[in-house]
Image (cartoon, helix red, strand yellow):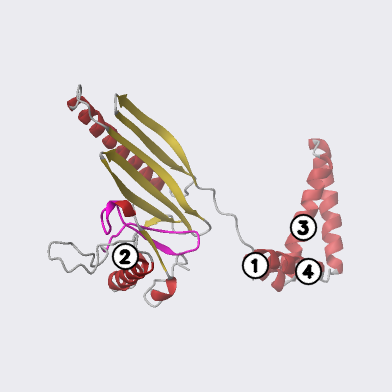
Amino acid sequence: MSDIKKIEDLKNEYNNIEIPSELDDIITNTIRTEKKGLNKMYLGRTGIAAAVLIATFTSAVNISPTFAESMSNIPVVSSIVKLVNFKTYTAKDGNMEANINVAQVEGLQNKELENQLNNEFIKEGQKEYGEFLKEMKAMEGEDNHKSVETSYQVKADNDSVYSIVYTKFEASGSSDTQYKAYTIDKKNQAVVSLKSLFKDNSYVDIISDYIKDEMRNEMKTDDSKSYFIDSTDPTDANFDKIKADQTFYINNDGKIVIMFNKYEVAPGYMGAPEFVIPSDIVKNILIDRGLVK
């Protein structure tokens, strides 16, 4: 049932409540009591109306069990979590340039987790910036080309999860893209690992087999696609299976998205591949946390 339908049903239930005669006495006595104090406090009609509303609402809940039960099913607006840009470290010398963005999470109820994530983001930014400055100094006077850019992006924000992806893009002749991802369980206020979503370790093979089938299908239907798979050359490193802690996030549709860094499972021109995993192939081994749908 949709949230709107729940609210409409609740409205109809409320309007159809049979009001007992005692409720008139409750309201009248409440008004008389509130008037005596409120006249002196210059709160006027607002305070009286609020008192009547509270009395009426409380009585309605007590009178109608159905009404009370319906109230428990009304969706509650969760706290607003947001990602903001905290700081940007910049450096430029000739053809060498860095833009290191540091994000901060705001609005988590678990402040310990919020501080932990924000400190990690700061340390990551300082590390990248420090390494770039050292490299820039070491190459001073040389005609080198290099750029580094980091960014954070919100991939999902709903009642269940808040997913953040950190991207590091580096170019120096060729380019490289690396990811880190953080999926926050809003209900339990904790970062979710891939392993924690499943009852056992069979998810590694199940997800890996699906991804390999997808790779084969893509290469079969599109000659421009290429993955490190099924090569008969003994010197080639074929993709076998994901890591137990493979980079992933949960998207707004409640689907697991497996991420690979550039060159990890495909040639550079393929970029950094992602694979959305259908929930039905893992539903039998999922721990029901309401995150994967």
Badge 4 element: helix
Q: How far across and how far down the image is residue 212, in percent?
A: 30, 69
- Identity of the residue drawn at 43% across and 70% down: 278
**Badge 2 or badge 1: first in the primary sequence:** 1
Q: How far across and how far down the image is residue 124, in percent?
A: 30, 40
Q: CA distance from mark 3 to mark 2?
A: 50 Å
Q: CA distance from mark 3 to mark 4?
A: 20 Å
Q: Amino acid at mark 3?
A: Ala
The image's mark for residue 145 is none
- Identity of the residue drawn at 73% across and 69% down: 9
Residue placed under numbered mark 4 in the picture: 12
- Judged from this view, the residue extending furthest toward the front is 223
- How many residues crowd mark 3 within 10 Å: few (<14), some (14–19), many (20+)? some
Q: CA distance from mark 4 to mark 1?
A: 16 Å
- Nearer-the-camera pick, 231 or 55: 231
- Magenta segment boundaries in residue numbering: 244-268
Q: Quadrant of residue 225?
A: bottom left
Badge 1 element: loop
Badge 2 element: helix
Q: Are marks 3 and 2 in contact (CB under 8 Å)?
A: no
**Badge 3 or badge 4: first in the primary sequence:** 4
Residue placed under numbered mark 2 in the picture: 195
Q: CA distance from mark 2 to mark 1?
A: 32 Å
**Badge 3 or badge 1: first in the primary sequence:** 1
Q: How far across and how far down the image is residue 136, in percent?
A: 23, 28
Above/below status of 254 relative to 81: below
Residue placed under numbered mark 3 in the picture: 55
